Image: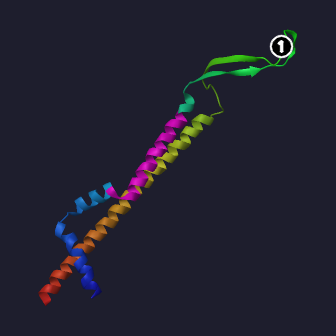
Amino acid sequence: MIILSFLMGLLPVVAYAQSLDEAVQQTLLTNPNIQTSKFNLEAASALRRQAFAGFLPSVDVVLARGLEESDNTTTRATELVNQRFDRYERSLVLNQMLYDGFGTSNYVKQQDAIMVATAARLATTRENTSLQVAQAYLEVLKTDQLVVLSKQNL
């Protein structure tokens, strides 16, 4: 009884008549584990670009404004104690890393290795998923043949 209900459940799958290549391609496009591995590879690639940015120059712009009260020898001498002053600050700083003890280059190498490992993990996930799809597909074909033979025997 259980086998018959299982076989009835497989009939709609056989009715679509999807080839093995189509089944594998569809699974590779929609499998959540593969999608997760792809996103992990994209994240590793972004981290690698971020690590490489340590070699590039950076520009920092600072603009600040605010009220200030000063109580020091200069303000006391001019009798400006407890008066509010409007303060402005502006700065532009350009930095370029010249030498950091090979920290940036080693960080880039580390991110390269992480990218390679993540790409290998994606390939492994794709291959394992393809194998599982092929096994399931062949199992459905085998079960379909068993149904045909059972009907012939009856």
Q: In this view, does 132 lie above or below 2?
A: above
Q: Name the residue under label 1.
A: 75
Nearer to me, 1 or 125: 1
Q: Which of 63 and 31 is in front in this view?
A: 63
Residue at screen point 53% across, 34% down: 52
Q: Is residue 107 visible?
A: yes
* Main SS class of the magenta portion in the image: helix
Locate residue 61: give its quadrant: top right
Residue occupying the point 33% across, 57% down: 30
Q: Position of residue 153 (x, y in %)?
A: 14, 89
Q: Residue 64's x, y, as percent?
A: 64, 22
- Which quadrant is the C terminus positioned in? bottom left
**Is 50 placed left or right of 34 in the picture?**
right
Residue 140 in magenta stretch: no
Task: Give residue 41's position: percent from left, percent from top.
Answer: 44, 47
Asked where in the image residue 87 lies, by quadrant, the reply is top right
The boundaries of the magenta stretch are: 30-52
Q: Is residue 95 visible to us here? A: no
In the rendered image of this protein, does residue 146 appear above or below residue 47? below
The reply, left or right, for residue 91 in relation to residue 5 is: right
